[in-house]
Image (cartoon, rainbow, N blue to C red):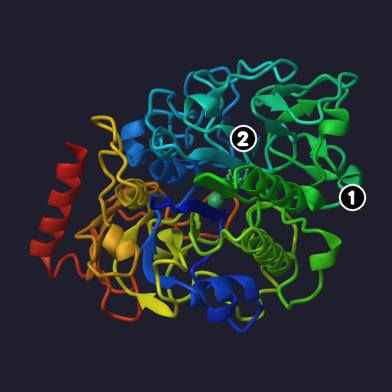
Amino acid sequence: EKQQPNIIILFIDDLGYNDLGYRSSSFETPNIDKLAAEGIDFTNAYVPSPTSSPSRVALLTGRHPIKVGFTRHIEANALDPYNNGEFGLWDGDPGEKPSRQHLPLQEVTFAEALKKEGYTTCSIGKWHLGLGDKSGMQDWNAPLPTALGDLGFDYSYIMAATADRVPCVFIENGKVANYDPSAPIEVSYQKPFPGEPLGKDHPELLYNMKHSHGHDMAIVNGIGRIGYMKGGGKALWKDENIADSITAHAIDFIDKYKNQPFFLYFATNDVHVPRFPHERFRGKNKMGVRGDAIAQFDWTVGQIIAALDERGLRENTLIILSSDNGPVVDDGYDDHAEELLNGHSPAGPFRGNKYSAFEGGTAVPAIVSWPKEIPGSQISDALVSQIDWFASMAALINAKLPKGSAPDSQNRLNTWLGKDQTDRPWIIEESSTMSVRTKNWKYIEPNDGPAMITWGPKVETGNLKTPQLYDMRVREYEKENLADQHPEIVYEMQNILRRVRK
Ligand code: NG6
Ligand code: CA
């Protein structure tokens, strides 16, 4: 009987196209380099959105984030998942519809599809998709909504949002891990708790890291966060141990389910802010903590692969390694990442960064390795999107998908397995505006927003009041707007968007 492959997604946060040892001389990533050498390195891989939540929505549901209602990325002064609104997050424009902040439980997820075929499924690390079907109502001292269970995950060990957001505790299968009854947890994204010191008033308490913008509310582990929090006691995480903790839980999961096919969705905090890697990764590269966080992630990758090797599972495990959005250098903490870049360009040849409609926001590293079926040392230039992982992996294991599930996910398995290099005819990118990318062209829809982010990071948004069209065959990517010269291509690209919207 054919044994279905284990499937692991190693999902790093905010890693840029160029943030790999084998693409840059500024630092080393030996474990990732080895993984790429043992599989396929995709050079034209895209996320559907240049920020975390919408990007993950597309991965897990195979649906354009805009259709799920996750229309906007997270902005500095936005409300957060746990406020009292049905939809909590919005980019500040009063005329604009706020974005949803929890994954609707009726969505059929990637995990659910695999679970139906006998896979044991697991989510470890950053979640950032809300918990339950309401926001802001959670009682962190009682069992939480079994959201991830309803979304097809048998086991979960997660941070509810991000490491720079409260609550700073891990949640294991719907309960705060290491819950400390002597320190009940309260969380608010609206009002501070009387008596709890805030980063903005108490810089002397920020002994581990100061903020550069935002992140001046609750103080946990000497680091300011987004949102207010009280309590937690011994359940509070120590940022320097996050990578160790999620890695250990992933290896436990692998060990426990080694005799049956499993799906591991493993999402790190690295290299998202706050970048506070363990001591043992510090100071070994020229880039400061951002480089150290990449080294920590590389170590994590090595540990997980070694765990597979030791159990004889590596051959028949399909590993996908990628990032949820493009890179950002200063994302709100004074970690000297900018001055220490030393010439390294995280987004490589691309314009823009995380949050941007330009390619730097959505072009990401993507590696696929499955020793049993995929010969190593391959490079694929095919245009691919993460939104297709769902349908492609479902096809791989002959999963029968419930009607209407993953409607925007295409089965491009042969491309993902390196059997062909067929480009996706087009991909959609959702930022502060909408873009369409084909192999040769990039179209960015007109948008009234500012050209630069106004609330902190020094990032070009890609907004312009008139249509933008760029020839992606030109190495100076997204420099010369050709919309006026090629109205017929603009029209074609707009038609793709029109069809998707319909
Ligand atoms: C922004 C945060 C940024 C980061 C981002 C989400 C501020 C000033 N900035 O609002 O630090 O958390 O949201 O990043 O609050 S993501 O990768 O999870 O989408
Ligand atoms: Ca991210």
Would you say the beta carbon of the disc 1 residue lies within 8 angstroms of ligand 1?
no
Please state which amino acid type lies under the numbered disc 2.
Answer: Ser
Between circles 1 and 2, the one closer to the viewer is: 2
For the point 55% across and 80% down, which residue is it?
22
Q: Is residue 394 above or below residue 226?
A: below
Q: Quadrant of the C terminus?
A: top left
Badge count: 2
Q: Nearer the viewer, residue 252 or 176?
A: 252
Residue 455, position in %: x, y?
57, 47
Q: Nearer the viewer, residue 395 or 16?
A: 395
Q: Secondary structure at mark 2?
A: strand
Residue 497, position in %: x, y?
20, 47
Apparent side of residue 257 relative to residue 98 in the rendered image (left or right): right
Q: On residue 426, which mark appears?
A: none
Residue 232, position in %: x, y?
82, 28
| Residue 168: quarter of image | top right
- Could you give the CA–CA distance between mark 1 and mark 2, rounded to whole angstroms? 31 Å
Q: Is residue 85 above or below residue 209?
A: above
Please state which amino acid type lies under the numbered disc 1.
Answer: Tyr
Q: On residue 156, which mark appears?
A: 2
Residue 455 appears in the picture as rendered: no
Q: Residue furthest front?
A: 1
| Residue 191: quarter of image | top right
Apparent side of residue 144 relative to residue 39 in the rendered image (left or right): right
The 10 Å Cα crowd at callout 1, few under 14, some 14 to 19, many 20 or more, is: few
Which residue was labeled with disc 1?
A: 207
